[in-house]
Image: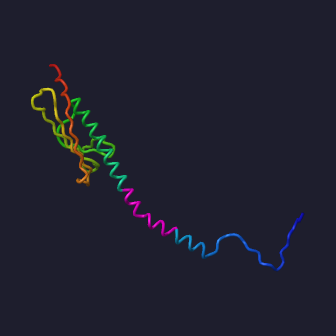
Amino acid sequence: MKLFVFHHGGKRRRGGFSLVEATFSLGLMSFGFLAMAPLLSVGLKTARLARDDRATAQIAQTLIEEARQGTLASGTVYLDIQGTPLNSASTAAYSAQSTSQSVAGSNSLTQMTLQITPVGAPERTRIYAVVFQTPPAPAP
């Protein structure tokens, strides 16, 4: 059993990386990150488009329910990112324009068309159409 080993005069190899190996590794990693940079912008754009699609669908669902209850007025409504109605267009994230008309041949059916547009992106307009039964008029 050896308790102590002394090295006199001989070179002892130490663990670790040489400067050339470290430089090569950093260069290889940098090249990989630069190759993946365009994917980041594509991913961010796709996330924004998915968020807009989800938000417009939720806004349409809310406005359709209001129309079914008879509390939605025709015209343009400005909404924030959560779909809450706003008083002005200055801070709005979405604008929703609704039009309603009676279905020909029926007194109780109404057709509503919603056009929801993200502010600043008119090419992303979504159009929703629904036919529903008109709520009965309140008795006098």
Among the 4 quarters of the image, the one containing residue 1: bottom right
In the drawing, does residue 71 fall left or right of residue 29?
left
Q: Is residue 105 magenta?
A: no
Judge by depth and name the residue closer to the eye, 72 or 134: 134
**Overall secondary structure of the magenta section:** helix
Q: Reply above or below: 35 against 78.
A: below
Above-or-below relation of 114 to 42: above
Q: Residue furthest right?
A: 1
Q: Is residue 68 left or right of residue 15?
A: left
Q: Residue at x 19, y 33 (%)?
A: 131
Q: Residue at x 15, y 36 (%)?
A: 100
* Percent of width and height locating residue 130: 21, 36
In this view, the residue in front, 140 or 38, is 38
- Give, as a single range, the part of the protein colored magenta: 29-44
Residue at coordinates 37% horizontally, 59% vertically from top-left? 42
User: Where, by quadrant of the figure, is residue 135 drawn?
Assistant: top left
Q: Is 36 one of the magenta-colored residues?
A: yes
From the viewer's perspective, tell me whether residue 137 is left or right of residue 60: left
- Snapshot quadrant of residue 97: top left
The residue positioned 64% from the left and 74% from the top of the image is 18
Q: Nearer the viewer, residue 85 or 74?
A: 74
Q: Is residue 140 above or below residue 132?
A: above
Rendered-image quadrant of the C terminus: top left
